[in-house]
Amino acid sequence: MSASETERLVKSKQRVADHGEVFTPSWMVEDMLDLVQEESERIDSRVLEPACGSGNFLVPVLTRKLLTVAAKHGKSDFEKRHDALFALMCTYGIELLPDNAAECRTNLAALFNAFLGIDQDDDWARAARAVLEVNIVQGDALTMTTPSGGPITFAEWGYLGKGKFQRRDFRYDELTQRSAWEAEGSLFADLGADLFAPQTTYPTMTVADLAGQVNAA
């Protein structure tokens, strides 16, 4: 491994010592994503990286999703833009260090903007930033808590068609228990919908609505 590659994988020896921070090389990321190629390329597959760093996994995942969008909607700009935003909505990360979380949001936003050919002041770019603020969470994936000690919450986004999106928020710790609760033979298998109700359900939103959330911030 060259010195330059080592530099890309480690920001500082102190951060390695304090937080175990070492980034995954790009060739390994691509090899791992190839093992789940169909899921990594599907627009609506929900991908969570629980130690996302600056986006070493999530940027390639979004790249693959956007390539699928381009192949599917080469001639429909309306659907291309909405599916591109939905692809971003299905991309999630948790990161312990605040500078990494911010850098991850920036990297994903830059990829999204480049794909649509827009600048950061465009409504679509602001909508993307609104999504990334809730999808890339600063917190501890092991304790499932934010720096303030509250539970990590994720937004489940749905594209309803005709430019309308739906958001429902769920607690991460409850989502991680869902498969066990709903397993065949479980006493609570038929109660999944009731046990895992969303914390919050929002009115349907358009891109303009999402962009307005950034303006108001």
Image (cartoon, helix red, strand yellow):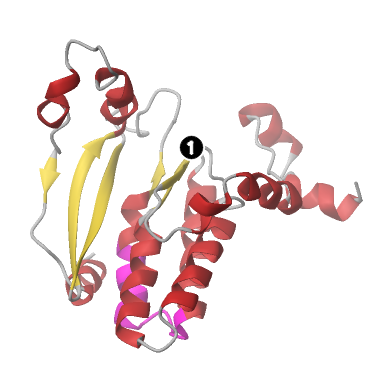
* Res 193 quadrant in image: top left
Residue at left offset 83%, top offset 52%: 5
- Say whether residue 87 is left or right of residue 64: left
| Residue 71 drawn at (x, y percent) | 49, 76
Disc 1 is placed on an element classified as loop
Which quadrant holds the C terminus? bottom left
As for residue 86 lying within the magenta part, the answer is no
- Say whether residue 96 is left or right of residue 7: left
| Residue 208 drawn at (x, y percent) | 20, 77
In the picture as drawn, the residue positioned furthest to the right comes out as 2
Query: What amino acid is labelled 1 in the image?
Result: Pro
Residue at left offset 35%, top offset 78%: 81
Q: Of helix, strand and loop, which mostly describes the magenta segment?
A: helix
How many numbered badges does the structure rendering display?
1
Q: Which residues are magenta?
A: 116-130
Q: Name the residue carrying label 1.
A: 50
Q: Nearer the viewer, residue 70 or 204?
A: 70
Q: Is residue 9 above or below residue 148?
A: below
Residue at left offset 29%, top offset 30%: 175
- Say whether residue 165 is left or right of residue 137: left
Q: Nearer the viewer, residue 37 or 166?
A: 37
| Residue 51 drawn at (x, y percent) | 53, 38
Residue at left offset 91%, top offset 51%: 2
| Residue 4 drawn at (x, y percent) | 86, 55
